[in-house]
Image (cartoon, rainbow, N blue to C red):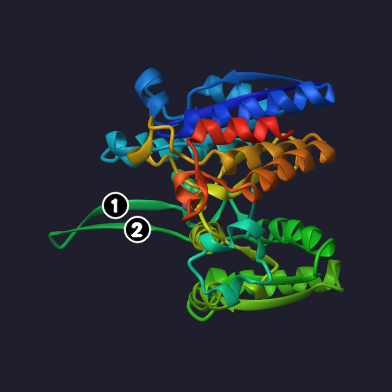
Amino acid sequence: MEYNIAVLSGDGIGPEICSGAIKVLNKVGEKYGHTFKFEQLPIGGYAIDTCGDPLPDFTVKKCLASDSVLLGAVGGYKWDNMPGDKRPEKGLLRIRKEMNLYSNIRPAKLWASLADASPLKPELVKNGIEIIIVRELTGGIYFGERGAGQENDAEYAWDTEKYSVPEIERIMRIACEIASKRSKKIVSVDKANVLESSRLWRRTVHRFAEENYPDIEVTDVLVDNMAMQIVKNPAQFDVVVTSNMFGDILSDEAAQVTGSIGMLASSSLGDTKCGLYEPIHGSAPDIAGKDIANPIATILAAAMMLRDSFDLTEEYNAIESAVAKVLDEGWRTADIYSEGCKKVKGSEMADLIVERI
Ligand code: IPM
Ligand code: MN
């Protein structure tokens, strides 16, 4: 089969990590008889500099026409003082919205050989951690009404968190589908003791599960408590469903608990098979161009694309096993390095994974 993949490398370490993932996909193609065609398209700061827009229309068109999208990262110091609409991040938010990618899956997994990289005490991580964060991605405060003004000599600004029942139901359906194949337990995170939108969220997730997935158990956890529980006892969680902003924050926390944010991949999907796959980390401008960034998150994102958009499960497994092998053999990029391991550059890490496929 031939697959057309749009590649939005973006800014900072984006191009380095995407090239690692492309090498891996090419090796998978060679081995399993697929052709992956890559088309590089501008997004983020790079697109602002070259096209005057963080998401040019032709990038959107080509992404929608592709079989799936691989994304690196967006943002950097250079564009930090741009107005909201001209920021690199706006490009990422818009592509998610234009492709209607309301479901963002972020699996935070502790790899056996990386237990040392977790900042938590060994007894908290010894039985492994795997939290599947299901983050709503096209609603909430990220996309709500906003504004700024001047009142009584003071400048003010505001954003709004708004969720509708259909928006909550469709993300809950995804969480239920995932949980059905796992523990059948879902933790729903909200702030229902304060926010009206969270109270609707809470009512809706329970009603939806009772009506459609009666064997799934839904438990509510307030977001502040959740932040604490993730460091107190992360192994208690399996599938977690939450809003756009809470999911953003909690997935960084879960990533760090499992060793490094450089290891976590994510898929973003809507109602079609054409999705967007990216690492959950950002563009890390401080280390860009030094070839020290960990490409594993992006490589695992590419693997998720094979499994979730193209139904290539065997190929997904081949990449995941190659990553596990490299880690078991003691190869480490700087972010996951601990004494006694073998430190390698980002590109070397990608090559090591390619060799093991
Ligand atoms: C992420 C990032 C983005 C987000 C930013 C870059 C807009 O932090 O994917 O987690 O907040 O969703
Ligand atoms: Mn984030």
For badge 1, the amino acid type reads: Ala
For badge 2, the amino acid type reads: Trp
Q: Which residue is mark 2?
A: 158
Q: Position of residue 273 (x, y in %)?
A: 76, 37
Marks 1 and 2: in contact by CB < 8 Å?
yes
Q: Position of residue 226 (x, y in %)?
A: 54, 74
Q: Position of residue 324 (x, y in %)?
A: 68, 48
Q: Give above or below for 166 relative to 15.
A: below
Respond yes or no on whether mark 2 lies under 8 Å from ligand 1.
no
User: Does residue 243 appear to the left or right of 88 in the view shown?
Assistant: right
Identified at 63% across, 36% down, the residue is: 99
Q: Which residue is mark 1?
A: 148
Q: Residue furthest left?
A: 153
Q: Give above or below for 118 relative to 47.
A: below
- Any part of residue 162 in sight: no
Query: Label 1: few (<14), some or many (≥20) within 10 Å?
Result: few
165 or 35, which is in the foreground? 35
Q: Position of residue 55 (x, y in %)?
A: 47, 28
- Any part of residue 349 in sight: yes
Q: Looking at the rendering, in which quadrant would you find the C terminus?
A: top right
Q: Earlier in the sequence, mark 2 or mark 1?
A: 1
